[in-house]
Amino acid sequence: MILYTIKRLIQGVITVWFIATATFFAMHGVPGDPLMTDKAMSEEVRKNLDAHYGFDQPKWKQYGIYIGHMVQGDFGISFAQENRRVNDILWEHFPVSAFLGILAITFAGLGGILFGALTARYRNRMPDIVIMFLVILGISVPSFVFAALGQLALVKLNAFFGTSILPVAGWGTLSHMIAPSLVLGLGTMAFLTRLMRSSMLEIVSSDYVRTARSKGLPTTRIFLRHELRNAILPVVTVLGPSIAAITTGGFVVELVFAIPGLGRYFVQAVQQLDYTVIMGTTVFYGAFLVFMVIVVDLLYGLIDPRVRLE
Amino acid sequence: MTAVIDQVTSALLEVRDLEVEFDTYGGTVRAVRGVSFEVHAGKTLAIVGESGCGKSVTVQSIMGLIPSPPGRIVGGTAKLRGKEIVDGVTADGEIVRGSRIGMIFQDPMTSLNPTMTIGDQIAETLQVHRGFSHSQALRLAVELLEMTRINEPSRRARQYPFEFSGGMLQRSMIAMAIACRPSILIADEPTTALDVTIQSQILDLLRDLQQENNMAIVLITHDLGVVARMADEVAVMYAGEFLETGTADDIFYNSAHPYTVGLRAAMPTNRDESEQDLMPIDGSPPDLFAPPPGCAYFARCPHAMEACRNDPPPGFAVGSGHMTRCWLHHADCSRRIEDLHYAAAAPLEGRDA
């Protein structure tokens, strides 16, 4: 298990390095550079920057310098924003994004398992039909539409009660987090519901559930110990990729709900060709995702004895 | 008359006129059509028949394991020691399923929960029916594994099904089924998925456990070799009906139904001198959406008469405890069953008679 973890972590580092490399060259493929702004820059400043980042040197040397800085944990200073180190931006805004993402994935996972089990239990009956219809909506409608609709609904709701039940936008308290994390998790929840439903249906008619019934076990015990546990295995498998879907979806939701997360900086940075911020956020997000996928895989090993690894 | 009553009360399990139907998109399938039998303590009843004839449905409906819908029990009764069983529970609330009647299945590889240790799965039955604590039940589970001749039972109890071989899984299934010392063990094709060596070991094990505990076994199989080796009594099932019931010797050496004779003739042998080709039974079983009005075997029977087409044959007693549903045994029938015994004379492997 420990050996496996170490192996996975090494693979993870290599993956992150690939991400960093690909981003670096893709970014430099875009015409222009961040220093070619309309603001006049003194010859001296330009020289200093060139010396630090090696802009006057060939690409592969710039790349070497960049990777060198990154390994030391220094993502540099933003070109577009005054006096801000990329590390500070990450430190300040990443926790917000991460918290939103974790809330959303928790909501999606629990909701998916619950609704999936429910629809399987009431197969082809009313709850199943209604939920599966909503699931199709949830999968096909993009999150920014839900974000807008959600805000509208909140405005109406607050107006109806004459008081603020839930804030429409902003960040700070737990009540601020509920609406955006619901919106953000909705698509994934719909997807997980469908997955859970089909997996549950398969397991309900499996041989070992028949065995469990032939043992005369009570229904709740069969459900919890024999059906549910085996049915959530595929859900846990896709949880890793789902985290990726949720964090990228988070960029948009953060903008709509005016949440001070990392997403906004990322989008801005791309527009302004802010090299260091693009690199910093991309690599950091990449590393975070790779790490989460490893965590999910290790978690899977705990749930399914068949993949428990030496 | 008193003899009959004695016989009835001595039966452990008594099934009368069981009828089971399934609703499907294509219509209603009459899977079991009026089946009656008795199971006696310490004896083995084998139910034989080809795939889809209703063997499994018969026992599963007694256990209350038929998924409903689409399945439903339309008629008949099942009594355990004289008390009627409904949905796996007797009339006075005694849980039959898993407690009084244990059950093992065809494919041990898929019949165990892959994410639970073998020990826990055995212990679970004891916790539920006997109210044992987890550690108590686990200790007994280890003993049960030992009884089913699994080496290093305490280590094995902590392992998962994927770490076991097929034979060991079936042994664990047996350990699980006999955990509560049931008076009846239903074995639904217990050796079909196993190779012959393991098959033999499992059958030996079942035999030994039966003798130790005076347990009745209901053995469902389509393997006449297994029947010959294990069965005291045999019921030959076809298209949801029992065509012939009797002792194993009656069925094998004194077959009274053309279907039984056909099955015997279709059995391969490994004797060198036998130059005979296999003799298959032509045709296929009838459609159970609309069972034939007369004898179910009519379409395939080489001895079919006009009477067989529209009149269902009643059970004819051919000897003590030997019954068959065939018009050939009617007193007015000019043909005799002896004519049927063209191939059944050879002794049967595995049966010492």
Image: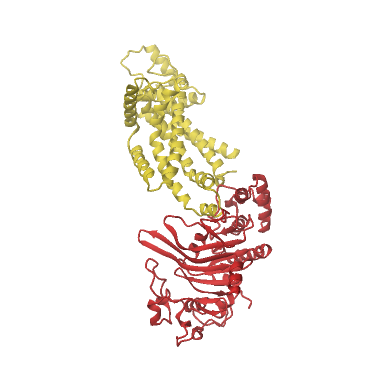
**Residue sitting at x 47%, y 50%:** A204
Taking A70 as reference, is B233 left or right?
right
Q: Residue B271: horizontal and vertical position, in percent?
A: 58, 79
Which chain is the one coloured yellow? A
Kindly give the residue lying farthest to the bottom in the view shown: B334
Which chain is the one coloured red? B
Q: Nearer the viewer, residue A287 or A152?
A: A152
Residue B234 figure quarter: bottom right
Quarter of the C terminus of chain B within the rendering:
bottom right
Quarter of the N terminus of chain B within the rendering:
bottom right
Res. B231 in view: no
Q: Residue B235: horizontal and vertical position, in percent?
A: 53, 71
Q: Nearer the viewer, residue A237 or B216?
A: B216
Taking B200 as reference, is A140 left or right?
left
Q: Residue A229: horizontal and vertical position, in percent?
A: 52, 44
Q: Nearer the viewer, residue B237 or A41?
A: B237
Q: How many marks?
A: 0
Q: Residue A79: horizontal and vertical position, in percent?
A: 39, 18
Figure coloring: by chain
Name above or below for residue B3 compared with residue B18: below
